Image: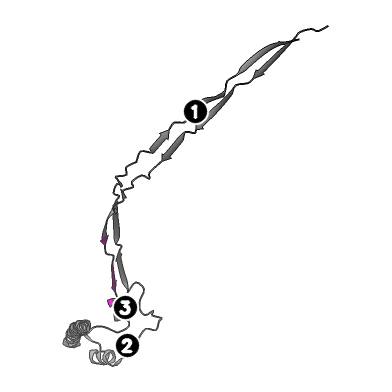
């Protein structure tokens, strides 16, 4: 027996996609830098130190006196010797004037005048301690620094942004079809 058969043929639809991709361009220009740093203002005030050294006494101890000092010393020694001589002669005159009181003033005066004075023996440090006088006044330094602020005139630049959107174009190449047949 012949049984009719159902025959079905189908074809798929075909589409064509034409895609244009999107394009994006981003550019960031550098910032315009304008920075300035002024120099700091610096002021300095100084006071000079002072040093004074007085060696007059030490030089005198070493017998290195100035002419003026030597003249003053000679004048003082001469004045002292004259004063002592005047006193001694006055005493001797008084002793001789009172010769009647006894004693032998002429012989005792001759002994005193003829006897040499003894000089003392001892250790002497030259120059003597403390003969050099040192005076020092320290100086000072006052430093003032005044910093200056930074001058900032920097400006930023906006980004450059170009965007082209993408497109999709759809075309139908083949339409779908369906055929149904009966076959015996």
Instruction: Tell me: residue 180, above or below residue 82.
Output: above
Of tags 1 and 2, which is closer to the observer?
A: 1
Mark earlier in primary sequence (2, 3): 3
Q: Quadrant of the C terminus?
A: top right
Q: Image check: 81 left or right of 57?
A: left
State the count of labels: 3
Q: Which residue is at 34% across, 41% downward? A: 157
Element marked by disc 1: strand
Of tags 2 and 3, which is closer to the observer?
A: 3
Instruction: Tell me: residue 175, above or below residue 150.
Output: above
Element marked by disc 2: loop
Which numbered disc covers residue 168? 1
Instruction: Tell me: residue 131, above or below residue 178.
Output: below
Residue 38, percent from left and from top: 28, 52
What residue range appears in magenta? 46-56
- What residue is pinned by disc 2? 117
Mark earlier in primary sequence (1, 2): 2
Front-lying residue, 59 or 150:
150
Residue 53, percent from left and from top: 29, 72
- Majority SS type along the magenta span: strand
Q: Which residue is at 40% across, 36% downward? A: 162
- What residue is pinned by disc 3? 58
Element marked by disc 3: helix
């Amino acid at each position: 027996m012949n049984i009719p058969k159902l025959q079905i043929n189908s074809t798929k639809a075909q589409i064509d996609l034409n895609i244009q991709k999107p394009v994006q361009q981003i550019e960031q220009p550098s910032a315009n830098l304008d920075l300035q740093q002024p120099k700091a203002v610096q002021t300095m005030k100084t006071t000079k130190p002072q040093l004074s050294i007085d060696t007059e006494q030490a030089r005198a101890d070493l017998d290195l006196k100035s002419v003026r000092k030597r003249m003053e010393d000679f004048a003082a020694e001469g004045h002292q010797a004259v004063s002592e001589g005047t006193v001694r002669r006055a005493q001797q005159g008084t002793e001789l004037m009172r010769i009647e009181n006894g004693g032998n003033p002429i012989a005792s005066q001759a002994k005193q005048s003829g006897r040499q004075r003894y000089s003392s023996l001892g250790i002497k440090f030259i120059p003597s301690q403390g003969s050099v006088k040192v005076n020092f006044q320290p100086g000072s330094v006052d430093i003032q620094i005044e910093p200056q602020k930074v001058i900032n005139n920097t400006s930023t630049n906006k980004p450059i942004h170009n965007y082209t959107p993408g497109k999709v174009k759809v075309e139908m190449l083949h339409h779908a079809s369906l055929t149904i047949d009966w076959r015996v």
